[in-house]
């Protein structure tokens, strides 16, 4: 996904430009720190205090120049209008958040308002069109059958959450003024890997396969996650 995001950034903004980035639901700050290291000015917004503490601990270990380029705010992604003025950012990330939001449209509209004209909105969501893949491959036929008619599922943390369908999000993005520009699949072949499994010796080859599948039909359509990139008109 990081490679996909970098592809979109390089294709949209001049090389060397320091971008204003907002990472909503940044978790422990993996993507936010990566972009700060690349020279961008990054703001991370996260409501989970444990995640905020982990992100701040990671940031504290970075060189001063990187620490100066990143700020962390504890808060809800649905309240971006409280913290920032419209058009304040060139790139807005919202990765792995929508599945926990029952009504995502207000959140998405708020994110789009944060973008400057021509800005990039990057979403990572659970693929509602492929919920039967994981239980089907594991032989759980009852769960696989039920998955065809729902966008609800239980994740690996044991939480009941929701997925999004590409068609629906395409319509939503058009409606909020950040129409879909590109989309990718994420975790096409590796979604069934056990949590905590050791990385394979040929990790670079695995990543190359996933990257290729994530941009190739029909593989990307059955990926566990979808990476959608909208552009503010």
Image (cartoon, rainbow, N blue to C red):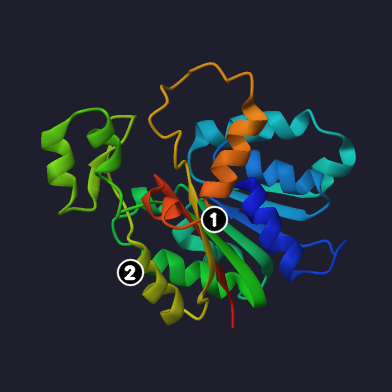
Is residue 167 rendered to the left or right of residue 32? left
| Vertical side of 193 occupied by 174: above or below | below
Picture coordinates of residue 103 (x, y %)?
30, 62
Query: What residue would you read off at disc 1?
Result: 215
Residue appearing at x 63%, y 18% in the figure: 201
In this view, the mark in front (1 or 2): 1
Picture coordinates of residue 24 (x, y %)?
55, 53
Query: What residue would you read off at disc 2?
Result: 168
Picture coordinates of residue 83 (x, y %)?
59, 62
| Vertical side of 15 occupied by 72: above or below | above
**Mark 2 neighbour class, 10 Å CA radius: few under 14, some 14 to 19, many 20 or more:** few
In the rendered image, the quadrant that contains the C terminus is bottom right
Q: Quadrant of residue 200?
A: top right
Residue appearing at x 38%, y 30% in the figure: 192
Looking at the picture, tell me which residue is in the foreground, 83 or 4: 4
Q: Earlier in the sequence, mark 1 or mark 2?
A: 2
Looking at the picture, tell me which residue is in the foreground, 227 or 90: 227
**Mark 1 neighbour class, 10 Å CA radius: few under 14, some 14 to 19, many 20 or more:** some
Q: Quadrant of residue 145?
A: top left
Tally the numbered discs. 2
Looking at the rendered structure, the secondary structure element under dot 2 is helix
Is residue 129 rendered to the left or right of residue 93? left
Picture coordinates of residue 96 (x, y %)?
46, 47
| Vertical side of 81 occupied by 151: above or below | above
């Amino acid at each position: 996904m990081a490679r996909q995001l970098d592809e979109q950034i390089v294709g949209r903004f001049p090389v060397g430009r320091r971008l204003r980035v907002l990472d909503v639901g940044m978790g422990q700050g993996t993507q936010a720190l990566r972009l700060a290291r690349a020279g961008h000015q990054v703001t991370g917004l996260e409501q989970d205090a444990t995640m905020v503490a982990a992100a701040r601990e990671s940031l504290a270990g970075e060189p001063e120049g990187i620490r100066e380029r990143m700020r962390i705010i504890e808060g809800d992604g649905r309240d971006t209008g409280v913290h920032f003025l419209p058009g304040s950012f060139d790139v807005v990330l919202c990765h792995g958040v929508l599945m926990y939001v029952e009504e995502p449209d207000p959140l998405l509209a708020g994110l789009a308002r944060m973008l400057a004209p021509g800005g990039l909105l990057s979403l990572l969501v659970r693929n509602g069109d492929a919920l039967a893949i994981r239980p089907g491959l594991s032989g759980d036929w009852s769960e696989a059958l039920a998955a065809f008619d729902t966008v609800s599922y239980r994740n690996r943390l044991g939480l009941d959450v929701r997925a999004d369908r590409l068609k629906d999000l395409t319509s939503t993005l058009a409606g909020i003024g950040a129409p879909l520009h590109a989309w990718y699949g994420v975790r096409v072949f590796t979604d069934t890997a056990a949590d905590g499994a050791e990385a394979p010796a040929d990790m670079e080859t695995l990543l190359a396969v996933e990257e290729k599948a994530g941009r190739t039909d029909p593989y990307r359509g059955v990926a566990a996650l979808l990476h959608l990139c909208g552009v503010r008109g």
